[in-house]
Image (cartoon, rainbow, N blue to C red):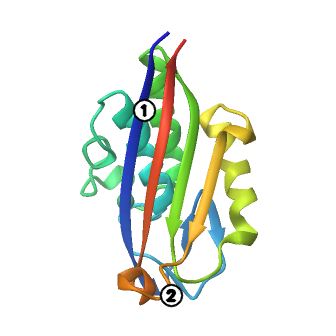
C-alpha cells in the first residue's frame, strides 16, 4: 500500500456584491470572491492538496484562468475532475482537512453542510472530511475583510 500526503493553499479577494461560494455551498454575505471560476477558495486549496499528493501540478495549471470553459464554473466540478485524476492514477482519497481564515461572516453554522457537500465528491465518509474556520483577530488582509485564506491537507491511498 502506498500512502501520499499533499497540501494546498489559496487566497481570493473579497468584493461587495459578489456571491460567496465556500466549501461547495453558497453563503449569505454582502461580499463574495473575485475569481475566474465561482471563487470557491476552499475547494481550490483542497484540489491543490489532492494534486500535490500525487505530484500532478496545481489547479492553475490544470484549469487555466484564461480558458473560457472554466469561466464562472462551479468549483465542485473542478474537484470532481481532480478526484477522477486521483482514481485514474490508482489511488483513492483517505481523508481531507481544510482550515479557512475569514473574518466575516461566521462560518460555524455552515461547516457541517460544507462537509456533507464535499464528502460525496471525494468519495469518502463524512468523518473523513474536516472543515475548520478561524478569524485572524482582525489582523492582516483577512482581518480587514479584504480576502480569505485557506489551507488544506489530504491523504491519498493506493487501491
Ligand atoms: Mg483559486
Q: In this view, does 28 lie above or below 73?
A: below
The image quarter containing residue 11 is bottom left
The image quarter containing residue 134 is bottom right
Please state if 53 lies on the left or on the right of 159 as rendered: left
Point out residue 46 in the picture as x, y percentages from the top left corner. 47, 47
Point out residue 19 in the picture as x, y percentages from the top left corner. 54, 76
Q: Can residue 35 be seen in this view?
A: no
Q: How crowded is mark 2: few (under 14 residues within 10 Å), some or many (20 or more)?
A: few
Instruction: Indicate which disc, 2 or 1, sits on the residue closer to the N terminus.
Output: 1
Q: Is residue 146 visible?
A: yes
Q: Which residue is depicted at the point 50% across and 85% down? A: 137
Tell which tag, 2 or 1, sits nearer the viewer: 1
* Whether the residue under disc 2 has CB within 8 Å of ligand 1: no
Q: Name the residue under label 2.
A: 17
Q: Mark 1 points at which residue?
A: 5
Q: How crowded is mark 1: few (under 14 residues within 10 Å), some or many (20 or more)?
A: some
Amino acid at each position: 500500500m502506498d500512502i501520499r500526503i499533499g497540501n494546498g493553499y489559496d487566497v481570493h479577494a473579497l468584493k461587495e456584491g459578489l456571491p460567496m461560494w465556500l466549501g461547495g455551498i453558497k453563503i449569505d454575505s454582502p461580499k463574495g470572491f473575485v475569481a475566474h471560476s465561482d471563487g470557491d477558495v476552499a475547494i481550490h486549496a483542497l484540489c491543490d492538496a489532492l494534486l500535490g499528493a500525487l505530484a500532478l501540478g496545481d489547479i492553475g495549471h490544470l484549469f487555466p484562468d484564461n480558458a473560457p470553459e472554466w469561466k464562472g464554473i462551479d468549483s465542485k466540478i473542478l474537484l470532481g475532475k481532480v478526484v477522477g485524476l486521483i482514481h485514474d492514477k490508482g489511488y483513492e482519497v483517505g481523508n481531507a482537512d481544510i482550515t479557512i481564515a475569514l473574518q466575516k461572516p461566521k462560518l460555524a453554522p455552515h461547516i457541517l453542510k460544507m462537509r456533507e457537500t464535499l464528502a460525496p465528491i471525494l468519495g469518502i465518509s463524512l468523518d473523513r472530511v474536516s472543515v475548520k474556520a478561524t478569524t485572524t483577530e482582525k489582523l492582516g488582509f483577512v482581518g480587514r475583510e479584504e480576502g480569505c485564506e485557506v489551507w488544506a491537507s489530504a491523504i491519498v491511498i493506493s487501491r
